[in-house]
Image (cartoon, coloured by chain):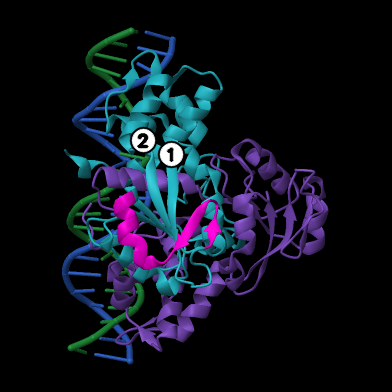
Chain colours: A purple, B cyan, C green, D blue
Amino acid sequence: MQDHLIPKASIQRLALYLRQLEQFQRSGETTVSSSALGEALGLTDAQVRKDLTYFGQFGHPGIGYDVGELIPSLRRILGIDRTWNVALVGVGNLGMALLHYRGFREQGFHVVSVFDQDPKKIHKEVNGLTILPIHALPEEVRKRDIRLGLICVPAESAQDVATALAEAGIGGILNFAPTRVAVPDAVSLCSVDLALELERLSFQVVRHAQPHVTPFSQDGNAATGF
Amino acid sequence: MQDHLIPKASIQRLALYLRQLEQFQRSGETTVSSSALGEALGLTDAQVRKDLTYFGQFGHPGIGYDVGELIPSLRRILGIDRTWNVALVGVGNLGMALLHYRGFREQGFHVVSVFDQDPKKIHKEVNGLTILPIHALPEEVRKRDIRLGLICVPAESAQDVATALAEAGIGGILNFAPTRVAVPDAVSLCSVDLALELERLSFQVVRHAQPHVTPFSQDGNAATGF
DNA sequence: CCTTGTGAACGACTTCACAGCC
DNA sequence: GGCTGTGAAGTCGTTCACAAGG
């Protein structure tokens, strides 16, 4: 409804809260206060409360937040209360790694199709999946109900792949190629540039600098005064 | 000098500018205006100028920025006008991938030592490097002048590894484990949580939402009206 | 006592708009 | 005409501080 009044930064932190709540749950906590949650993540209590109230009224005054109640709520809001079928394009070093990475499947993201343009790789098997040529994308997306795509190709081909994914009707793209790609409005886009992260780290070290102590170079610094 | 007046967001964009400038250089451009640079990255011209002037006076009024002049300046500022020796801890799927990832070496980051705690892996060779036990860290760091560490272990061991790296005297850590780690002030920290990125993407798709069109889930959206 | 939820105050970042220079 | 560098204005996000509830 009033989506766009929600600060992007707050949205970014949602998944972070979920992570931490799951950790609290494993430790046997049944209830958590905004200050406990904030402290664990390097955020203020006010920040936590404000963020959460953008998405609903989850707290119980005098008590805090019920862990077993908040976790499913956040999962539903994030859209991960179900599984997502994912296509992976580019079976190089990085693509191969992501294909084997367990963290994705644990969160309900299933890589169900892999693509590459190298004729030497096409039709080979990796991790139980047959590598397909890019032109098979539209059909696979339809047949397997694929909603997300991972771009793991070199920078030069990233835009072409993004366009192909968009035309195949994908909903969102996670781009690992070290370049900016443009997509139609109907497609959501996130990017992770691994070398870029190291460069930022390098800068911090050179400056003897203080860090942002957070997932995603986002934020949530606490013990550090930059 | 007056480091901390520089917005963190501007610092984050520095490496982005460098990327784009290198692309312009490959296309044969010798000079670039703030608006051209901004457009390519989804930023306003004013933003670009303001960001760059935090670090020096690089522009030529009436002309723009000299590509061949700005690139080395940015590289020096970022601290990547030389190579960095890097230690990688955790040779699982992700660690293995990052070890083979060319993007790091291309930017001057050399993985020179790899560590794991699994006795079955120790002393095996990967990519020309012998896997060492964690307790060999301090000596390796000293002998090989290692300044940066990559944490590619599961969440449970991430904090221990971070502590070990810090104690070995490393300058900066790039954490890929899906958990928050604490480090002493003397150590810089960046984190990349791959599954978290997918969760954020999932949210955007579910909301039919608009994206941040940028590296690093940071920012720089342009053609998209969130 | 303990907590949450929230307007109001504050601070940080971005954009505007123009002076100065090529 | 072109462009950059920069104070001033504006916008956005965070923190404060307190009313209301357990």
Residue A224 lies, with reference to residue B38, above or below; the image says: below
Residue shown at 56% from the left, 22% from the top:
B27
How many other residues sit within 10 Å of disc 1, few (<14), some (14-19) or many (≥20)?
A: some
Q: Amino acid at mark 2?
A: Arg
For residue D2, which quarter of the picture? top left
Residue A89 at x, y = what percent?
69, 50
Q: Which residue does the numbered mark 1 point to in the structure image?
A: B108
Q: How many numbered marks are there?
A: 2
Question: Disc 2 sits on a residue from what chain?
Answer: B
Residue B59 lies, with reference to residue D10, above or below; the image says: above
Residue A156 at x, y = what percent?
63, 35
Residue shown at 82% from the left, 61% from the top:
A143
Question: Disc 1 sits on a residue from what chain?
Answer: B
Q: Are marks 2 and 1 in contact (CB under 8 Å)?
A: yes
Q: Which mark is residue B82?
A: 2
Residue B22 lies, with reference to residue B29, above or below; the image says: below
| Residue B146 showing in the rendered view | no
Which span of residues is magenta-colored?
A: B124-143
